[in-house]
Image (cartoon, rainbow, N blue to C red):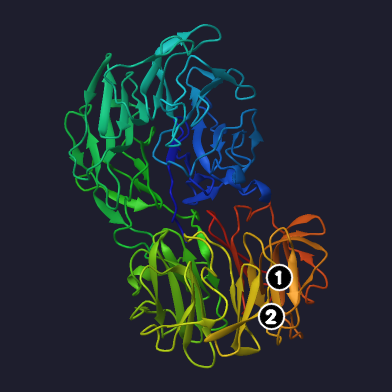
Amino acid sequence: MGGGGAIPGIVLHPRVPGLAYIHTDVGGAYRWDAGRQTWAPLMDGIPFKEWNLYGVDSLAVDPNDATGNIVYISTGKYTEAWAKPYGMLMKSADRGATWTRLNLSPTGGSNSDQGCGERLAVDPHNSNHIVYAARMGGFFTSGDAGMTWTHVAAAPSGASPDGKDKRGSGLCFAVFDASSGTVGAPGCTRVIYIGASNDGVYMTNDGGTTWRRLEGGPATSRKGVMGPDGSLVVSHATGVARLAGGEWADITPPKKGGGGGCAVAIDPNDAGRILATLGGGHKTPVFLSTDSGKTWRDVSGQRNATRTWWPGWHWFSNPFSIAFDPIHRNQVWATDWYGTYHTPDITAPNPVWTNRVNGIEEIVTAGALVAPETGKYRLFSGIADIGGLDHESLTAPPAASIWVKGLPAGLARTGIAVKGDLIATVGTHNWSEPGGGGYSLDGGDTWKTFGSLPYKGIMGGRVAITGTGRRILWAPQGGQPYYSDDLGGTWRPVKCAENLAGTARGGTIFSFDQPLALDGADPNRVYLLHDQELLLSKDAGATFILVNSNAPDDWIHKIATSGKPNDVWVSAGDHGLYRSKDGGASFVRDPRVQAAGIFCFGKAPAGKAFPALFLKGNVSGTDGYFRSDDEGGTWLQIDLPNERIGNDPNTMTGDWRVFGGVFVGTNGRGIYYGRPL
């Protein structure tokens, strides 16, 4: 697909032409393959249970390494207790093909605040000397290329005055001043700067032993970059500042975009050339100065879009980082919420920016994947931040965003249902704002918004097309289910003696329950799983009755039917996989399945009527992906070279056109497709 997720940083190697790295908030790190003009993912070998390490908070190369092989990363998405391991520093000696874990475990947080600079840095005079400015915990140094680390108590901690870093930013950048010379033996760079998100900029003049806060500098620093002459440029909450000769100067560009400074860069070969962006939002302007920030020129230029599905406003949206190519003087790279950009000549009167997003698959699926048996589209997806996509092909990017095909801009699909050429979809606006939905009558080519909503403030959830007509059943988050017989023109509440509010749990798009399923043998029979209550409708969702008050449940649960009458399956996380052959009245657990995360049915094997069954979980003590071709009687483990699909898979759907075909959506590494060799 290309693009779709936040890319907080880009690092270009100072000695190897065309060698660049990016790091993402939730989808790992990538290396630019200049020959193939694509980004290569570097972290797909992270084991399933360590999915939190797919977030990369910072990346550094060794500027002294002429081979370009040495790379360091700081990993960890979240800092909450459920996200262990929080983080890990790693080192690669082969450009990210393999990683060695170092003896320092940061607190993670790459998905907490993406607007800071690089916290990792390698001394330009000594490859063994590495520094790390942590979000929480303070400042650390290594004198043996990362094998051991020492906490520097004299350095700033980055904590807020009460000792707690409420913003999750702490120390936000560390940079060496190569022009300052060295101190001590074996010779470390004398001057180092640290940015503290809540406490200004600090400096050491003795290689890191003593530190002092620089008066007159920005109090809320974000990113810091060094010039070849020893000048320092810092973006902060209200603009951009430059330190030269011990004096601070405000060099904020014209505030066309409003807000504070964000991305900044200095030409490593010409300290007078500075790039900066201001504020956030879409179409943020880019500015160039050739006189150390005294004057600026808008170099936002023109777009060369390589993805037609990107909406027109989906460009330079909250830029995170920008960088001069250190070898090709006028080439510049940048990153933002959705991808990376490159211009071959920043000095051109109207620079041309190309979104270089081949290989970047950082989208986060929002619980909805549907692969129809027939029709133009192979897959319909619901995706955070970009709403969702209608995929005509498995090998080419989609043609258009759902937002330009008739659905409201900002609607993130959380539920999708297909019945021939009729497709219904529901979702939230953005992540957690009241939602809406719509339908297509031509198989997904065009969409129309529902004429009304069941109630004000309705949120996301799941949807089904029930019965023999066009009834749309909507199970929202928080509220009661409703149904419509006129394509969303009017809605009626579902009747049930039980309270069905919140059948689809959670308050954001990041809710991965699948509580709604049709009986494949009878479209009038519909199942709803509400916590431990399993309910059944025999009239296409108009009324429901309780059939089981002790159904399998976990903090995430999913229900699916096989197509056999009364055949209901439920996955319940660490509680396993369950099957009912009597319409949910009773369930039997598969004793070999110790954990059942996501599961689905797909096209049946040749000569069999029962569909293939797919599972991501633990079978007989082994974590992985599995397929059963005999109703769960035996399980075949699906081969996953280099682990893969370990980045918190959250949704799965079978390919009903190809036996053994299956789609898996992830939390930051896009959508995978597998099929038998």
Q: Residues within 10 Å of mark 2 (few under 14, many from 20)?
A: many
- Give the vertical position of 395 relative to 225 (above or below): below
Q: Amino acid at mark 1?
A: Asn
Q: Position of residue 197 (x, y in %)?
A: 38, 30
Q: Amino acid at mark 2?
A: Ser
Q: Residue furthest bottom?
A: 468
Please give left or right for residue 388 compared with residue 617 in the image: left
Provide the secondary structure element on which disc 1 rests.
Answer: loop
Disc 2 and disc 1: Cα gap in Å? Answer: 21 Å
Viewer-proximal residue among 101 and 469: 469
Instruction: Give the labeled residue for mark 1.
Output: 550
Q: Is residue 377 visible?
A: no
Viewer-proximal residue among 145 and 482: 482
Q: Nearer the viewer, mark 2 or mark 1?
A: 1
- Which picture quadrant has residue 326? top left
Say the numbered circle drawn on residue 562. 2
Q: Residue furthest top?
A: 184
- Which picture quadrant has residue 193? top left
> Which residue is found at the position 78% from the left and 66% from the top?
636
Q: Position of residue 363 (x, y in %)?
A: 48, 57
> Which residue is found at the position 53% from the left and 58% from the top?
670
Provide the secondary structure element on which disc 2 rests.
Answer: loop
Viewer-proximal residue among 467 and 404: 467
Viewer-proximal residue among 642 and 107: 107
Q: Position of residue 567 (x, y in %)?
A: 72, 81
Q: Position of residue 84 (x, y in %)?
A: 63, 42
